[in-house]
Amino acid sequence: MKKTLLPTLLCFAKALREGKKGAILTSVFMKGFPLLELRSQPMVVFRVGVCLFLICVIPSCKKENRWDCIKRTGEQTTDTRTLPPFTKIYLKDNIDVFITQGAVQEVKIESGKNLTSLIKTKVIDGELRISNDNKCNWARSYKKGTIEVYITLPTLIRIEHDGSGQVKSQNTIMCDVINIQTKESGDVELSLHANTTFLQCLGSSDITLHGTSSNLGIYHVSEGYLYCEDFPVDVMWGGSYSSGNEYLNVKLSLGVTIGWVGNIYFTGNPSTIETKGKGQGKLIHQN
């Protein structure tokens, strides 16, 4: 069996990479691989699996991350990056982001030494785009594989969260208009003092807001929850087409369209309340 193992593996891997499903079985039997013998030899099965993984997966990776699946994270390091000015943030992948409003812009990456080079940060049209190009992140422990980005900036007008990490503010962010959009599972918790706040919730993430805003607009299509009871607003309008609930604090005017099963709970005593929609969810006053 040993003499036929290597050539069979090579044929098997080549056929698998090329998508030739029919050729896989042919290559196995034509090379005389005694498949039945493997059932009684679990160690051989394990080694075969490892060989196939290395042969099939690693060559298909880009050169810069070809060995990601077997490399260690390395000791924790901090990498400070000099970037062009930005007022918007776009985030992907399993990265935690902590935002501070301050006079001097700064971006710091805290991660394992061996991961840092493939944590990408680039500014395009005033937007900081952050992504983790390391592969096989599932193979690392959560604690050792944690990637944290600390951002200080004077002005923030938009956050687009398209990842699984968390986004948090470390102080109260003062702004005129801010747009916050979530698309995946990563949660967002911010302290804001704004004139107008827009929330677009398109994924399963929860959004928690603290502070104040004169106006709040919401478009909610997901199973995530919105926690804005500690975020009093004068005027709120929006649509809920979600299975997740919303918790609001409205002073003057409240207008909502309910299109699915999620409830909208609100505190405050708005003089104007308007409800539309045919969803099963309810508008519930908690005072």
Image: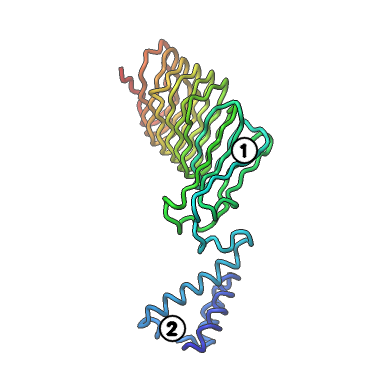
| Position in image of residue 262 (x %, y %) | 37, 32
Q: Which residue: 38% across, 23% down?
A: 229
Residue located at (53% from left, 79% from top): 9
Find the distance from the CA under tag 2 to the CA under tag 1: 52 Å
Q: Amino acid at mark 2?
A: Leu
The residue depicted at 46 percent of the width and 15 percent of the height is 234
- Residue 128, which numbered label? 1
Q: Nearer the viewer, residue 283 or 177?
A: 177
Q: Name the residue at the top extreme.
A: 271
Residue in the foreground of this view, choosing between 27 and 257:
27
What's the colour scheme? Answer: rainbow
Q: Is residue 86 left or right of residue 285?
A: right
Quadrant position of residue 60: bottom right
Which residue is the site of mark 2?
Answer: 35
Q: Earlier in the sequence, mark 2 or mark 1?
A: 2
Q: Position of residue 4 (x, y in %)?
A: 51, 87
Category of crowding for the residue at label 1, using alpha-carbon neighbours closer than 10 angstroms: few (below 14), some (14–19), many (at least 20): many
Mark 1 residue type = Leu
Can you name the residue that lies furthest to the left here? Answer: 287
Eyeballing the image, is 112 above or below 109? Answer: below
Query: Tag 2: Cα neighbours inside 10 Å, few (<14), some, or many (≥20)?
Result: few
Q: Residue at horizontal 41%, vertical 37%?
A: 224
- Foreground residue, 199 or 152? 152
Please state, as top left, top right, bottom left or bottom right, where the C terminus lies in the image. top left
